[in-house]
Image (cartoon, rainbow, N blue to C red):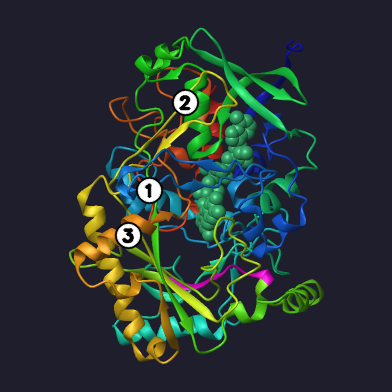
Amino acid sequence: MQETAERTDYIIVGAGSAGCVLAERLTRNSRHTVTVLEAGGSDSRFWVQVPLGYGRTYYDPAVNWMYDTEADPGLGGRSDYWPRGKVLGGSSSINAMVYIRGQRADFDDWAALGNTGWGWSDVGPVFDSLEGKGNTPDGAPDPDTPTLHVSDVSKRAHPMSRRLLDAAATLGIPFNPDFNGETQEGVGYYHLTTTRNSWRNSAARAFLRPARKRANLRIETQAHAERIVFDGGRAVGISYRQGGKLKRLDATKEVIIATGAIGSPQLLQLSGVGDPTHLKELGIEIVQGNANVGAHLQDHLGVSHYYKANVPTLNDTLGTWPKRIVAGAKYMLTGQGPLGMSVNQTGGFFRTPGSDRPNMQLYCQVLTTTSVTGARPLLMPDPFPAFSLGVSSCRPKSRGYVAIKSPHESVAPAIQPNSFSHEDDMREMIDGMKFLQKLAATPAFRDVIDAPIGDAPTCQTDAEIEADIRAQAGTVFHPSCTCRMSPTTIDGVVDNRLRVHGVRGLRVVDASIFPTVTSGNLNAPSMMVGAKGAEMILEDAVDA
Ligand SMILES: Cc1cc2nc3c(=O)[nH]c(=O)nc-3n(C[C@H](O)[C@H](O)[C@H](O)COP(=O)(O)OP(=O)(O)OC[C@H]3O[C@@H](n4cnc5c(N)ncnc54)[C@H](O)[C@@H]3O)c2cc1C
């Protein structure tokens, strides 16, 4: 039985990277009441707050949706495992914390597709404001405005990971002190979303937590949105389940969906906004037909080469229980050591032949788990020193989809990445793998490599490399574009103010609205979408 509806001005469904920023920005103005509905629970969990804890949350159903994709023809018919955060902070509470804004040209591409207001000159200041840059006339962060602290770990990176910088220099790839600066190209140290005292700095910790004390913000956890409620062509509320009870919340102003690249198309489709043919087959009443809902899925695929080393790596630091206890104690007492960081410490961006801007991202990880199958226990690494070099493509051209399989909200949707369905993506990845082989052959790495692990690093022909890629490539966790922003419904779901085409009172504000996937990791651009979405919602509230 459904309870009587309660009311709020704005409903935000999903407290992820975008949703947390949105909630904080909307509630700065005490005129509006905002209620956030989050399917997951509190983020006050040790392994969520400890940076390296993502090795544990990776397979923890208490905080993770734990999706499996459909059999992917491009991956030899394999299904891939897709973790997504189901907790306050969403995926920013379980991610690997690498902070990358994206290339300036990515956003100029968005604007060139007709999305006015989303070019670099528009979004650059929004990124700055998230980090507290330029929030006051003298440029210093305003202490009363929640901002995101991002850590420079260059002084704390493991010595083995520093070798990447020398190896890349040998191949003519320059050092880049800041991938979020003028140019993304080059190798260097990743900036991480950790706090000054080395806790995970998720969107929940940076933005939702400081906003929680505001009287106009209400946060409901374990609140799973099942349907958007429409009245005529207007979204007027959300029907959600909490504690076994079906409840309804009405929005006097707007309903905002921020449930991520899987959750947002799923919720729209369940609510009758999607491909009419598909929805009719499932017996769902059509509110607004639009076959683009769930289509255009883009992701970054990664492939790695693994090597046994003849010098210590993080495997040695965390390889046995006594060592893990020492590392844990050091972290708790001083905030120092590997538990307070990501395993992604160095990396960068480079070009393969024919690309006019960096098209591949590089990772050097000095912790490996090759001898463990199944779960991915980052805290229980291989019992020998080893490291990996990995690449992922920045702007793949393949497109997949997300489509509900059932009208029932508890059934996970079909996720079909269609990896390598565009031939350019395989060419680029083969070239990327050859680059890894060149890196491994430089003195900086050659001197410390004991032996390759598996055959991949020694594949010779393109055919061998391609077979290896299809056998081992996997997501690097960046699904996007499933409720794509575009001026028309020919190829889009939301307009440039993130309003869902064809209905009223409904926006989507998260990584699903990306017109094209950005170059690099997606947490920063998802938070930027949250901040920019809030700006537009507040502007429109004034106009209304
Ligand atoms: C393992 C992993 C590692 C990653 N590493 C990095 C990295 O190092 N750097 C980086 O920049 N990015 C990384 N990412 C990607 C990045 O975190 C995401 O792209 C980003 O967080 C997406 O933000 P979002 O707001 O679109 O969605 P999310 O943050 O996923 O938020 C969606 C929220 O909606 C909630 N929700 C979904 N459905 C419902 C419903 N029906 N009702 C109520 N609530 C619902 C979810 O529980 C979740 O809290 C990683 C992701 C993962 C999973």
160 within the magenta span: no
Marks 1 and 2 close (CB-CB < 8 Å) = no
Kind of residue at badge 2: Ile
Secondary structure beneath label 1? loop
- Location of mark 2 (residue): 404
- Location of mark 3 (residue): 469
Which of discs 1 and 2 lies nearer the camera? The answer is 2
342 within the magenta span: yes
The magenta stretch is: 339-347
Q: Quadrant of ligand 1?
A: top right
Q: Nearer the viewer, residue 539 or 385?
A: 385
Kind of residue at badge 1: Val
Queried on whether the Cβ of the residue with tag 1 lies below 8 angstroms from ligand 1, the answer reads no
- Location of mark 1 (residue): 517
Which of discs 2 and 3 lies nearer the camera? The answer is 3
In the depicted structure, whether residue 388 falls above or below residue 217:
below
Taking the image as drawn, is residue 13 in sight? no
Secondary structure beneath label 2? loop
